[in-house]
Image (cartoon, helix red, strand yellow):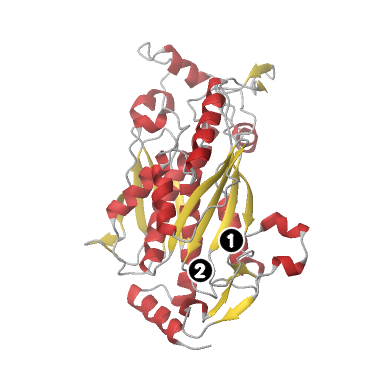
């Protein structure tokens, strides 16, 4: 079983991720790891925190001489902003006069929950009246640790030829309506890395940037939709014998667990409910020797998004993920002080205006963790030579 755990607070000294279950013998590329960390920080609409942090993931266990040992891997992401928040995270009483007024307000003004955030429900759950005890862990800063762990799972899958890409299809009311060519995943990667909002169409990109700019001007936030594409997975990963074997359910759960995500749609998704079966199901064809990872079966359409009955069918995994607008607004909404129970405006934290471009990067990491686990469950996880031997035998075995 490939499993991971993260810990740490948004403004604590560090975030930590422990990844257990990668096979021994996998060469880890630290440059590729830090590249994924940097991708998460990019995107038009990000806030001031990204100017402070330059995220890097330090591997402190489980890797020796550049190769995995098969034991748990510990990754540490230092928070540079910790130095600016030490007095708030661990304040003395009273706060020192050296602390500027803004920081003093942030230290104490944590009793007015933000609508849409974990503040109120988390405060009630753990009996915290100082909501910083909730919001620090509930912050999307946690995704830095998840991207670190997901990057290593991604490196395993990329070793076997699997490719990942995401692109933004909607921000606010601006939607990518033009049909884009997704045949070359590497080209999709190149275009989106060069785009401020990870959009494949330059005209739509400009409209998305303007929408974010207008929201920022109004001190508001915007959500949107990203599309995830995973190419190169073999047929037969996952299962249907039990509900938790189903790979589509596991994938959807991992993506729904991400901050701000409110919807996950696989393949045709909700549109399939409007059509007849003859318009939805992907017809099956066969070409001997043409598609070893698919056992030479293939489809001309991919309405199922690469998953049928909880199992990969060899086609691209295609998932759309909807993220709501950030819940911290610079024009705060109505709230209630949890201590006095009197009406108040929600607390204001340093915030982004739109995180949808970054959401795509986090989705790639979350998906990689789920898909790598399914891959190892099929082909073995003790050491890379065994995994590769079993995978090659699968490809060579006729069906």
Left or right: residue 215 versus residue 85 is: right
Frontmost residue, 11 versus 198: 198
Report how far apart the C-alphas of labels 2 and 1 lie in the structure. 10 Å
Q: Residue at x 59, y 27 (%)?
A: 129
Numbered disc 1: secondary structure: helix
> Pointer 2: what residue?
374
Q: Is residue 116 above or below residue 396?
A: above
Disc 2 residue crowd, few under 14, some 14–19, many 20+, Cα 10 Å: many
Q: Is residue 84 above or below residue 373?
A: above
Q: Position of residue 11 (x, y in %)?
A: 42, 32
Q: Quadrant of residue 385?
A: bottom left
Residue 46 numbered tag: none
Q: Position of residue 205 (x, y in %)?
A: 50, 38
Frontmost residue, 340 versus 120: 120
Numbered disc 2: secondary structure: helix
> Pointer 1: what residue?
250
Residue lying furthest left in this view?
65
Q: Are marks 2 and 1 in contact (CB under 8 Å)?
A: yes
Q: Residue at x 46, y 65 (%)?
A: 372
Return the disc, 2 or 1, that comes first in the chain's sequence: 1
State the count of labels. 2
Q: Is residue 329 visible?
A: yes
Q: Is residue 212 above or below residue 252?
A: above
Frontmost residue, 390 versus 377: 390
């Amino acid at each position: 079983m490939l499993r991971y755990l993260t810990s740490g607070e948004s403004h604590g000294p560090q975030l930590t991720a422990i990844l257990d279950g990668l096979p021994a013998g996998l060469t880890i590329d630290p440059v590729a790891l830090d590249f994924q960390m940097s991708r998460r920080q990019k995107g038009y609409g990000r806030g001031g925190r990204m100017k402070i942090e330059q995220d890097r993931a330090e591997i402190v266990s489980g890797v020796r001489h550049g190769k995995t040992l098969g034991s748990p891997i510990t990754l540490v992401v230092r928070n540079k902003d910790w130095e600016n928040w030490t007095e708030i995270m661990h304040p003395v009483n009273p706060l020192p006069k050296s602390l500027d007024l803004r920081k003093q307000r942030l230290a104490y003004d944590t009793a007015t929950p933000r609508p849409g955030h974990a503040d109120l429900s988390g405060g009630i759950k753990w009996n915290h009246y100082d909501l910083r005890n909730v919001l620090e862990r509930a912050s999307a800063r946690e995704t830095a640790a998840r991207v670190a762990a997901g990057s290593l799972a991604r490196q395993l899958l990329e070793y076997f030829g699997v490719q990942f890409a995401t692109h933004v299809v909607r921000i606010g009311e601006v939607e990518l309506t033009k049909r884009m060519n997704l045949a070359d995943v590497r080209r999709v990667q190149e275009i989106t890395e060069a785009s401020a909002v990870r959009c494949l169409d330059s005209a739509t990109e400009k409209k998305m940037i303007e929408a974010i700019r207008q929201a920022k001007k109004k001190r508001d936030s915007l959500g949107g939709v990203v599309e995830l594409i995973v190419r190169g997975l073999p047929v037969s990963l996952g299962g249907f014998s039990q509900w938790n074997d189903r790979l589509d359910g596991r994938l959807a759960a991992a993506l729904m667990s991400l901050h701000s995500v409110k919807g996950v749609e696989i393949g045709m998704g909700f549109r399939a409910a409007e059509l007849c079966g003859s318009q939805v199901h992907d017809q099956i064809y066969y070409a001997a020797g043409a598609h070893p990872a698919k056992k030479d079966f293939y489809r001309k359409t991919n309405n199922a998004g690469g998953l049928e009955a909880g199992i990969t069918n060899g086609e691209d995994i295609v998932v759309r993920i909807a993220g709501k607008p950030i819940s911290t607004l610079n024009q705060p909404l109505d709230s209630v002080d949890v201590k006095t129970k009197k009406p108040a405006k929600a607390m204001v934290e340093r915030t982004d205006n739109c995180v949808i471009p970054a959401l795509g990067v986090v989705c790639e990491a979350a998906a990689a963790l789920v898909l790598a686990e399914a891959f190892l469950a099929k082909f073995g996880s003790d050491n890379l030579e065994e995994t590769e031997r079993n995978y090659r035998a699968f490809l060579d075995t006729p069906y």
